[in-house]
C-alpha cells in the first residue's frame, strides 16, 4: 500500500549506462477490451461476445530483459555469496511460527469459547482500522504474483521450479515464509465476523488475476531495489497495525501483526544485503538502477486492487491508511532516506558522470518528496466518503 508519487515531478535528464535502464511510458486503458487485448484475448474468442472480467487499470509499455549478458554472469558469480548470506536468514520450518499458533484451536473442546473471546476483542475495533487490515491481508494473499515477479528476474530466477541454486532456494523459502502472513490475517478476520469475506475473496482473486506492474524490466538490479523498499514498507505497515490494535484493546491481534512485522524486517535485511553487495561490486550501475526505480516511483504490490465494484479501491484504501497513520507519504520518504543511508549512497566514489547525477538525484529526493507532500496537504480538497464492500458497504472518509 502507499500513496502514488508522480515520477514526472522528479525526472531529470535521461542517462545511459551498460544497463540501458528504461523509463516506461504510461497508458491508461479506457475499457475492459484494452485489458483483454493485453492478455491476448479478443472479443471473438469470448463466448457470446461477453467482455472478460478484468477491470480497467493503468498499465505500462515496459522494456524487458534490459540486463546485458555480462551482468547476468555477475549474478551467477554471486551464488556462493547468496548461499552464505541469504539462506542463513531463513528459519527452519520446524522453528517457525504457524498461523494456528495464534488462532482458536478447532480440535479443542473450547473452540467455540475461544471464537467468542476473539469476537469480543474485535467488537470495538473501528471500521477504518479493519479496512486497512483487510487491505494488508489482501496484499499478503496475492503472494503468487510476487513469487512470479521474482522469477522474471534474469540471472536469479528459479529455472525449473525446484532448482537448487541459492537464488531459487531463497525465492521459494521466502515465499513459504510469507505465505503464513495472509493465512493468519485471513482466518483472524474470518472469525471476527466483522467483514464481508466473500467480497474480500473476490478482491484477492481479482488481484492475483491482475498481477502487478513494478517496472523492473526482468532486471535484478531493479528487482532487488524494489523488494528492499517493499519489505521495509510492509515492516512499517504491519508494525503500525500492531500498535493500533493494542490501542484498540486487541492484544492478540497486536501480537499477530507484530510477528508478521518481524518476518518482514528479517526479509528486508536479506534484500538490502543483496543491494549492498551490488553497490560494493558495481556501484555505478547500482546507483543508476536506484535512481531509475525512484524516478518511476515504487508502486505498491496491490496497486491493481479491485473488488468488482470500486475502480478506485486501492486509492481509497491508501487514503484511509494515510489518515490513520498505518502507511503515509512521510513513510515513503523515510524509507528512501533509510536506504540511502543504509547503502552509503552519498559516499560512493568512482562513478561516471551519469552515476554522479543519479547519486545527486537520489540523495536529494527524500526532502523534495516531503516538501511536495506538505504542499499537497495544504492544497488538499475536503475529504469525502466512499463505501467499502469489505465492511458491507459502510462509508469511510477517504
Image: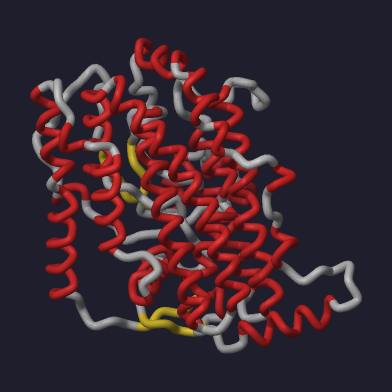
In the picture shown, does residue 281 fall above or below 128? Answer: above
Q: In the rendering, at what x and y percent does residue 350 appear?
A: 14, 21
Taking depth in this image into account, of 180 and 247 the one nearest to the observer is 247
Residue 74 visible at all = yes
Residue 196 shown left or right of residue 226 in the figure = right
Taking depth in this image into account, of 371 and 214 the one nearest to the observer is 371
Q: Quadrant of the C terminus?
A: bottom left
Q: In the rendering, at what x and y percent does residue 275 appear?
A: 36, 32
At a point 51% along the width and 32% down the height, the residue shown is 86
At a point 44% along the width and 42% down the height, the residue shown is 269
Q: In the rendering, at what x and y percent does residue 221 appear?
A: 35, 29
Residue 102 shown left or right of residue 257 in the figure = right
At a point 61% along the width and 82% down the height, the residue shown is 122
In the picture shown, does residue 286 fall above or below 1? Answer: above
Quadrant of the rendered structure where residue 353 is? Answer: top left
Q: In the rendering, at what x and y percent does residue 224 appear?
A: 40, 35
Residue 63 shown left or right of residue 344 in the figure = right
Residue 51 visible at all = no
Taking depth in this image into account, of 84 and 113 the one nearest to the observer is 84
At a point 14% along the width and 74% down the height, the residue shown is 379
Taking depth in this image into account, of 232 and 207 the one nearest to the observer is 232
Q: Quadrant of the N terminus?
A: bottom left
Amino acid at each position: 500500500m502507499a500513496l502514488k508519487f508522480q515520477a514526472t515531478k522528479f525526472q531529470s535528464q535521461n542517462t545511459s549506462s551498460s544497463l540501458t535502464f528504461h523509463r516506461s511510458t504510461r497508458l491508461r486503458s479506457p475499457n475492459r477490451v484494452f485489458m483483454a487485448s493485453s492478455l491476448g484475448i479478443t472479443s471473438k474468442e469470448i463466448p457470446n461476445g461477453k467482455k472478460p472480467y478484468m477491470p480497467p487499470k493503468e498499465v505500462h509499455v515496459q522494456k524487458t530483459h534490459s540486463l546485458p549478458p555480462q551482468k547476468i554472469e555477475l549474478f551467477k558469480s554471486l551464488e556462493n555469496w547468496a548461499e552464505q548470506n541469504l539462506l542463513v536468514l531463513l528459519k527452519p520450518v520446524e522453528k517457525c511460527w504457524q498461523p494456528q499458533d495464534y488462532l482458536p484451536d478447532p480440535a479443542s473442546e473450547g473452540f467455540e469459547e475461544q471464537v467468542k473471546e476473539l469476537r469480543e476483542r474485535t467488537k470495538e475495533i473501528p471500521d477504518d482500522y479493519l479496512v486497512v487490515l483487510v487491505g494488508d491481508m489482501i496484499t499478503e494473499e496475492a503472494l503468487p504474483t510476487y513469487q512470479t515477479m521474482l522469477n522474471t528476474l534474469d540471472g536469479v530466477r528459479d529455472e525449473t521450479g525446484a532448482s537448487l541454486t541459492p537464488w531459487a532456494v531463497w525465492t521459494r523459502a521466502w515465499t513459504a515464509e510469507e505465505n503464513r502472513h495472509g493465512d493468519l490475517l485471513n482466518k483472524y478476520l474470518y472469525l471476527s465476523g466483522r467483514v464481508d469475506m466473500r467480497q474480500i475473496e473476490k478482491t484477492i482473486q481479482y488481484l492475483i488475476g491482475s498481477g502487478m506492474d513494478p517496472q523492473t524490466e526482468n532486471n535484478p538490479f531493479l528487482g532487488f531495489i524494489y523488494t528492499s523498499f517493499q519489505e521495509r514498507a510492509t515492516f512499517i505497515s504491519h508494525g503500525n497495525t500492531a500498535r493500533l490494535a493494542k490501542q484498540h484493546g486487541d492484544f492478540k491481534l497486536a501480537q499477530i501483526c507484530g510477528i508478521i512485522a518481524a518476518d518482514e524486517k528479517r526479509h528486508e535485511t536479506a534484500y538490502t544485503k543483496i543491494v549492498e553487495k551490488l553497490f560494493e561490486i558495481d556501484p555505478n550501475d547500482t546507483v543508476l538502477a536506484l535512481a531509475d526505480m525512484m524516478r518511476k516511483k515504487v508502486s505498491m504490490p496491490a496497486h491493481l486492487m479491485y473488488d468488482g465494484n470500486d475502480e478506485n479501491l486501492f486509492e481509497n484504501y491508501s487514503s484511509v491508511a494515510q489518515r490513520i497513520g498505518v502507511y503515509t507519504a512521510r513513510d515513503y520518504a523515510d524509507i528512501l532516506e533509510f536506504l540511502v543511508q543504509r547503502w552509503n549512497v552519498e559516499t560512493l566514489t568512482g562513478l561516471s558522470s551519469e552515476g554522479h547525477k543519479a547519486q545527486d538525484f537520489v540523495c536529494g529526493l527524500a526532502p523534495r518528496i516531503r516538501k511536495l507532500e506538505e504542499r499537497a496537504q495544504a492544497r488538499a480538497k475536503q475529504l469525502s466518503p466512499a463505501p467499502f464492500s469489505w465492511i458491507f458497504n459502510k462509508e469511510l472518509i477517504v
